[in-house]
Image (cartoon, grey):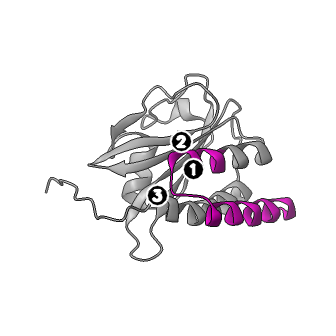
Amino acid sequence: MKSDSTKLLQDLAAFLLAAPKTPETVKRAAEMTRADRGYRWIGIYKIERGEFRIVAGTGNEPPTYPCFPITQGLCGVVAESRETIIVADVHKDPRWLPAFWNTQSEIVVPIASETNGRLLGMIDVESDKLDAFGEDDRDFLEHVALLLAGKLCTAKKTHHATAD
């Protein structure tokens, strides 16, 4: 990982440790990450009642789908596999659910609880350039996901209806 990324992770950890558990805190963390890494857009989604719901997105423009079923899109793929996915050209992937129509490539990272491993949400980073993400982005964003997990956890357990 780039050494300047280590500094951002330290700053992000300090900020998240001291900040309250609010959507504004998550938005600020997303903005810090976007600005430092030069990403076009970052969305932080939380899983609630079987759906992904946006908690925070960078910028002022909302995504096309602020809420969608956990079985859809690249986020749905990651929810099933629980592994980060990098898509070099989203227009060639039939699973892609567009947040923004000018997106060319995307990386989606799962956010899981450190205590029980329960899937809490996703970090969705999008670029208007093809093949914009690599292993350094994966490593960095997986560390960010660990830091964000504590801010997405809820005190009470939510029950999700599942179809067998």
Between the residue at mark 2 and the residue at mark 3, the CA separation in whole angstroms equals 11 Å
Q: In this view, does 34 lie to the left or right of 78?
A: right
164 or 55, which lies in front?
A: 55
Task: Answer whether labels 1 and 2 touch (C-beta < 8 Å).
Answer: yes
Main secondary structure found in the magenta portion: helix
Q: Is residue 62 above or below residue 158?
A: above
The secondary structure type at the circle numbered 1 is helix
Whether residue 86 can be seen here: no
Say which amino acid is labelled 1: Val
Task: Answer whether labels 3 and 1 touch (C-beta < 8 Å).
Answer: yes
The secondary structure type at the circle numbered 2 is strand
Instruction: Name, please, the residue furthest toward the right.
Output: 3
Say which amino acid is labelled 2: Ala
Quadrant (top left, top right, bottom left, bottom right) of the C terminus: bottom left
Q: Quadrant of residue 160?
A: bottom left
Q: Which residue is drawn at 64% across and 31% down?
A: 59
Say which amino acid is labelled 3: Leu
First in residue order: circle 2 vs circle 3:
2
Write down the region rendered in magenta. 1-30
**Label 1, on which residue?**
26
Q: Residue 152 carries which label?
A: 3
Q: Residue 56 carries which label?
A: 2
Crowdedness of circle 2 by 10 Å Cα count: few (<14), some, many (20+)? many
Q: Is residue 96 above or below residue 34?
A: above
